[in-house]
Image: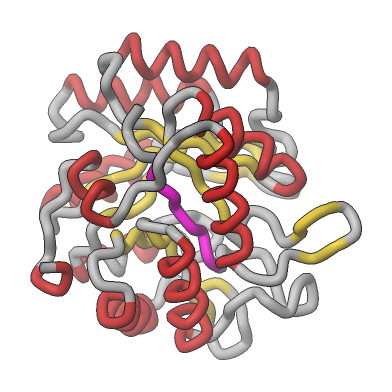
């Protein structure tokens, strides 16, 4: 099996310091937390930013400072910026794409979230995808539903996605796809049937299911996401002490299954990303 790429979702749009004091909110805190996770074994940083009140925003200036700090302190790490709908509306969600990060998240369809509809209308998806092509940004398809995998395949066939999509299954969001092993296995088979047996893929489990989905992904040859965006707890009674601690737990899961952990060089090779000057 290929080495396992570990993505750390450092902040997200929902967790606050009231939920867990370890959640990094300011740009400086996020850079420090990402560096610790990088040292622990993460090779992708999935990034959101917050405003001065700690609320989610798509402010390109804050994204620029975060990207610059990660590239400086975590040489070679893949910077993946979020275009998610909790941080903004309409084309504001892609306002950071001219920064040309290595990657950006891309939801290609709508679904239910705990208290709202996560809207990703076709015209916005088309625009975000076009901006990613313009600025040389590799999309990560966030699949909250089976239809999103098929939509990504259609977009690839039409040439809207120049490379085979890197699909991440997101499981465990309330009112969306639950954590179910038979569904997970079907997702894996579907991605391989549509894109080829050798296509890289990833999975993320939300909340208490984070470690469960990590284990499934590692065992099946996929890549894995962890971090305080998705899960603020270590176990039922204990808060997670840091992003780095969650990365370390995933590194241990890799060891249990005989999987090497991908270096940033491995991750860039697997995802066909260039070695940036900062990483040379």
What's the colour scheme? secondary structure
Q: In the image, which residues are magenta? A: 4-10
Q: Can residue 121 be seen by looking at this rendering?
A: no
Question: From the viewer's perspective, is residue 32 above or below residue 46?
Answer: below
Q: Does the magenta run of residues contain 72? A: no
Looking at the rendered structure, the number of numbered marks drawn on it comes to: 0
Q: Is residue 148 above or below residue 42?
A: above
Residue 135: x and y, percent? Answer: 13, 58
Residue 67 point in image, percent of width and height: 31, 75
**Residue at 64% over, 70% down:** 242
Where does the C terminus fall, quadrant-wise?
bottom left
In this rendered view, identify the residue nearer to me: 264 or 109: 264
Closer-to-camera residue (184/63): 184
Q: Residue at x 23, y 65 (%)?
A: 76
Q: Is residue 6 above or below residue 197?
A: below
- Compared across the picture, whether 205 is left or right of 97 comes to right
Q: Position of residue 52 (x, y in %)?
A: 56, 90
- Classify the position of the N terminus by image quarter: top left
236 or 169: nearer the eye? 236
Residue drawn 46% across the image and 72% down it: 34
Is residue 20 at least partly visible in the picture? yes
Q: Quadrant of residue 91?
A: bottom left
Q: Residue at x 9, y 71 (%)?
A: 277
- Relative to 59, 197 lies left or right: left
- Tell me if 267 is positioned left or right of 136 in this view: right
Residue 5 part of the magenta-drawn span? yes
Determine whether 276 is above or below 124 in the image.
below
Q: Nearer the viewer, residue 243 or 40?
A: 40
């Amino acid at each position: 099996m290929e080495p396992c790429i570990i993505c750390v979702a450092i902040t997200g749009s929902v967790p606050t310091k009231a939920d867990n004091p370890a959640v990094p909110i300011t740009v400086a805190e996020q850079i420090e937390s990402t560096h610790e996770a990088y040292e622990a074994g993460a090779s992708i940083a999935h990034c959101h930013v917050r405003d001065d009140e700690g609320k989610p925003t798509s402010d390109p200036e804050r994204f620029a400072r975060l990207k610059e700090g990660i590239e400086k302190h975590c040489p070679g790490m893949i910077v993946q910026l979020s275009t998610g709908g909790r941080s903004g509306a309409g084309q504001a969600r892609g306002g950071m794409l001219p920064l040309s990060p290595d990657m950006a998240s891309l939801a290609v369809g709508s679904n239910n979230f705990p208290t709202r509809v996560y809207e990703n209308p076709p015209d916005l998806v088309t625009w975000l995808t076009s901006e990613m092509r313009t600025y040389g940004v590799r999309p990560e398809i966030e699949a909250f539903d089976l239809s999103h995998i098929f939509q990504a395949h259609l977009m690839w066939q039409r040439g809207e996605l120049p490379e085979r999509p890197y699909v991440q299954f997101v499981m465990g969001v309330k009112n969306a796809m639950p954590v179910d092993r038979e569904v997970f296995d079907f997702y894996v088979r579907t991605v391989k049937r549509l894109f080829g047996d050798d296509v890289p893929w990833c999975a993320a489990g939300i909340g208490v299911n984070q470690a469960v989905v990590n284990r499934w992904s590692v065992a099946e040859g996929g890549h894995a996401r962890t971090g305080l965006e998705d899960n603020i707890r270590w176990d039922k009674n204990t808060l997670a002490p840091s992003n780095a601690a969650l990365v370390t737990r995933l590194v241990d899961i890799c060891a249990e299954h005989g999987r090497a952990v991908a270096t940033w060089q491995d991750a860039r090779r697997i995802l066909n990303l260039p070695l940036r000057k900062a990483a040379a």
